[in-house]
Amino acid sequence: MTQQYVNALQHSNQMIQMFAIHLSTLKHQLSLYSDEHKRAHLFIKLTSELHVIITNVQSISITQNVLIDLVT
């Protein structure tokens, strides 16, 4: 399960909401990660185009839900 989580990447045709649900399901099964860690993993695994959008916002206290809302 840990390896599935580590290897998970957003597919180019996959909506961020669906990818976040997939990651959340894997994380729930692991129950090892803090919210900050979950948010960091989500960001790292998004497409490079979304990295640019999110980085331009430059908000330190962004939650995972806000992150998803920013790019939808």
Image (cartoon, helix red, strand yellow):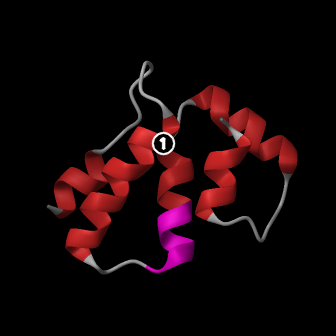
Image point (78%, 45%), residue name: 55
Magenta span covers which residues?
34-39
Check if residue 8 falls in the magenta segment: no
Q: Residue furthest top?
A: 13
Q: Residue 36 in magenta?
A: yes
Considering every residue shown, the one lying at the far left of the view is 1
**Above/below status of 54 relative to 53:** below
Badge 1 marks a residue whose secondary structure is: helix
Nearer to the camera, 44 or 19 = 19
Quadrant position of residue 59 = bottom right
Q: Residue 63 lies in what quarter of the image?
A: bottom right
Side of 16 relative to 56 (left or right): left
Q: Position of residue 32 (x, y in %)?
A: 31, 81
Q: Residue at x 28, y 59 (%)?
A: 25
Which quadrant, please, contains the C terminus?
A: top right
Q: Is residue 27 above or below residue 20?
A: below
Give percent across and percent down for residue 68. Answer: 61, 48
